[in-house]
Image (cartoon, rainbow, N blue to C red):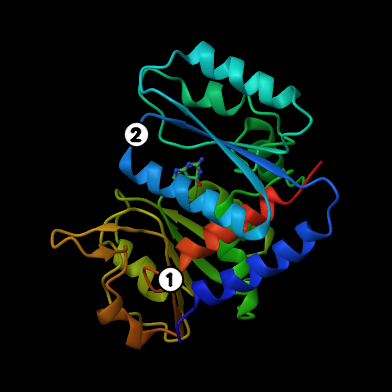
């Protein structure tokens, strides 16, 4: 069965737009983009489009690729102090001359709609409620909940250990009492770990989940999205080979991607 991220994301966006419509002071999301990374430009456009759709004001602030870190930090300080701005998002990746962690953690944790600041990451890690959960793992949990997929006691395999997806995903699965195995491209016997898992979440950016599953009740979540050598949009999972052997699977596109956007809009509608 397909986990229809498009359909569920539309439902969430609708709920967010109803909530926002009842707010006297509308949320205002500021997106900071450095340089012109083509993927980032598309992501930022999609975020702004979704914000508009749900009635959240959004402003894009673009900087050239060679911007000095101090300039970015100054802008973030200004936005932190602006009571009209309720959410701040710095699109990643940032150019190499900029210390990503310093920039991200300059954002007020109360406006950190990505949930990437040290405070929000730390809160998640030590079992406190963060002000915002990172959008992609939160979107995945929303999708699983929508299909009533039970995580408690399940064996979850998370492939990829990025700050954006893998690490927060692990924490959120632990919070749901899953037994979590963290894998990466160096993991030995990865296929063995995948085949027997109850849930596999792959966020690598290469075709890494190829084997048929032994566990026919398994759930496969494909976070990867990239173009293959033929220019086709594809994910980490060999969908055609694996889909017959699982209970639930996300398509690419139309799975995790739209859920991430809906989840981000859910965050952007929270005002502290
Ligand atoms: N680049 C890729 N994914 C993300 C994300 O979720 N947030 C930000 N800010 N940048 C990204």
Helix, strand or loop at disc 2? Answer: loop
Q: Is residue 58 above or below residue 35?
A: below
Which quadrant of the structure image shows residue 151?
Answer: bottom right
Question: What is the crowding at mark 1: few (fewer than 14 residues within 10 Å), some, or many (at least 20)?
Answer: some
Tell me the residue that label 1 is attached to.
Answer: 254
Asked if disc 1 and disc 2 are in contact, CB closer than 8 Å, the reply is: no
Is residue 150 in view? no
Give the total number of marks visible in the rendering: 2
36 vs 1, nearest the viewer: 36
Question: How far across and down, in percent of the image, does residue 78 sit?
Answer: 68, 20
Q: CA distance from mark 1 to mark 2?
A: 25 Å
Q: Position of residue 46 (x, y in %)?
A: 47, 53
Q: Is residue 229 left or right of residue 42?
A: left
Q: Nearer the viewer, residue 58 or 180?
A: 58
Task: Please give the name of the residue rendered at 52% of the width and 50% of the height, measured from the top-left corner.
Answer: 47
Q: Which residue is depicted at the point 70% across and 29% down?
A: 108
| Distance from mark 1 CB to nearest ligand 1 atom below 8 Å | no
Quarter of the figure that contains the N terminus: bottom left
- Which residue occupies the foreground of this view, 162 or 158? 162
Task: Tell whether 260 sits left or right of 176.
Answer: left
Say which mark, if any, is on residue 235. none
Q: Residue at x 45, y 70 (%)?
A: 255
Q: Residues within 10 Å of mark 2 (few under 14, many from 20)?
A: few
Mark 2 = which residue? 36
- On screen, residue 53 above or below 30: below
Q: Does dot 1 land on a helix, a strand or a loop?
A: loop
Percent position (x, y) of residue 48?
Answer: 54, 49
- Give the quadrant of residue 106: top right
Q: Nearer the viewer, mark 1 or mark 2?
A: 2
Considering only vertical position in the picture, is 83 above or below 28?
above
């Amino acid at each position: 069965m397909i986990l229809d991220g498009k359909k569920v994301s539309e439902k969430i966006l609708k709920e967010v737009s109803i909530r926002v419509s009842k707010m006297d002071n509308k949320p205002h999301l500021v997106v900071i983009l450095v340089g012109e990374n083509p993927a980032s430009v598309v992501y930022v456009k999609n975020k702004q489009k979704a914000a508009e759709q749900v009635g959240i004001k959004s402003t894009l602030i673009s900087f050239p690729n060679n911007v000095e870190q101090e300039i970015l930090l100054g802008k973030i300080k200004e936005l932190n102090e602006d009571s009209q701005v309720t959410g701040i998002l710095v699109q990643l990746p940032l150019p190499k001359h900029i210390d990503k962690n310093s920039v991200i953690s300059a954002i007020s944790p109360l406006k950190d709609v990505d949930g990437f600041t040290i405070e929000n990451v730390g809160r998640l890690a030590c079992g406190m409620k963060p002000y915002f959960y990172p959008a992609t793992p939160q979107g995945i949990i929303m999708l699983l909940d929508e299909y009533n997929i039970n995580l408690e006691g399940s064996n979850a395999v998370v492939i990829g250990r990025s700050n954006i997806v893998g690490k927060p995903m692990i924490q959120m699965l632990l919070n749901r009492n899953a037994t979590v195995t963290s894998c990466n491209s160096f993991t030995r016997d990865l296929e063995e770990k995948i085949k027997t898992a109850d849930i596999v979440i792959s966020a690598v950016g290469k075709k890494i989940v190829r084997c048929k599953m032994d566990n026919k009740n398994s759930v496969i979540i494909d976070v990867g999205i990239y173009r293959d050598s033929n220019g086709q949009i594809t994910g980490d999972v060999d969908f055609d080979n694996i889909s017959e052997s699982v209970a639930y699977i996300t398509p690419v596109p139309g799975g995790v991607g739209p859920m991430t956007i809906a989840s981000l809009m859910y965050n952007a509608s929270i005002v502290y």
